[in-house]
Amino acid sequence: MSLPLDGLSAIVTGAGRGLGRAEALELARLGAAVVVNDYGQPGRDGSGEASAAPAEQVAQEIRAAGGRAVAHLGDVSGHEQARVLVELAVETYGQLDILVNNAGILRDRMIFSMTEDEWDSVIRVHLKGHFNTTHFAAAHWRSRSKAAGGPVYGRIVNTSSEAFLAGSAGQPNYAAAKGGIVGLTTSTALALAKYGVTANVICPRARTRMTEDVFAGFQEPQDGGLDALAPEHVSPLVGYLASPAAAKVNGQLLVVHGGMVAIVERPKVAAKFDASKETFSFDELDELISPYYADRPPNETFAAAEVLGLKRG
């Protein structure tokens, strides 16, 4: 019996732990040969010495289960290292079919306290890291498509966050990077569709090293059941988006957690005002717009606990 991803190869970045690990294991379970990428630094802020151990442990886990996997120690925020990563997949498996971008770090700080380095480092790893791998994967697929004289198989799954949708007061760098990833994904989806490649982006909620503070107050199951915030709730969607079954899913944003997937529409116009003359005056804008906001809460954002349907401990 064939598996959905039989004969396909995949790269998963940040796959040594958490979401990336669960995604790499799921792709392998579905039949893909996997390049497990992780820089392996112990600190979630990107601190500490790089280590091949996390990536190699996951690759070994895949091989032990009968799958195919190789480990790659590399920082995807480095353009050259991203090139080597894509070349490793092509050299090892003959071609690259699936790219899952997940690598990231956190350096949280309020906007008035954030340093330039804290801003740059998070943008570099998340947003530039997504760009770097996407750039080389896209060039690979374009070259293959030209040689084949038609579309080829290619799937990109990028990782954003609801921090860009709802805001996150102590994470201006992270929220900005995640918003940028959505823009990168939709642009990539349009550019690569003619080559047979799809690009989609997920906003996962999961209890990992990256989110241990965010979800620290939410109860974990006491009966031994699967945590609603377990990464294993996210990985099946990644496997689906990477598969032939998702050929018509392109340029989409999906929120996923705890047995739920929500497809997010593009922003809609909530209200529209027209100038009575050629252009607006200050007074006219005040008369039109101020009443619209007069009865609204001062800070309309998602209430995470309500949306998650979880209780704090």
Image (cartoon, rainbow, N blue to C red):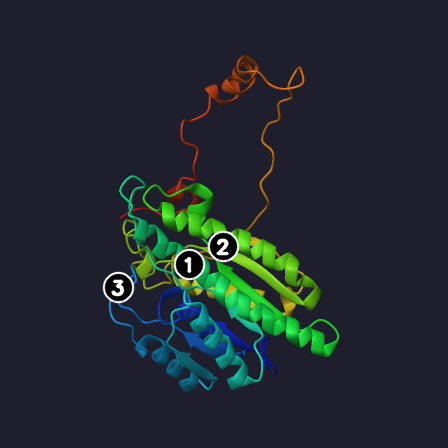
Q: Using the image, tell me which numbered label, if any, was put on residue 126.
A: 1
Q: Is residue 74 above or below residue 125?
A: below
Q: Earlier in the sequence, mark 2 or mark 3?
A: 3
Q: Quadrant of residue 299?
A: top left
* Element assignment for label 2: helix
Name which residue lies at 74% across and 73% down.
150
Q: Is residue 144 visible?
A: yes
Between the C-alphas of marks 3 and 1, the distance is 15 Å
Residue identified by numbered label 2: 181
Report if the CB atoms under discs 2 and 1 are less than 8 Å apart: yes
- Residue 250: x and y, percent? 63, 58
Residue 286 located left or right of residue 145: left
* Element assignment for label 1: helix
Residue toward you, 224 or 206:
206
Residue identified by numbered label 3: 47
Residue toward you, 96 or 298:
96
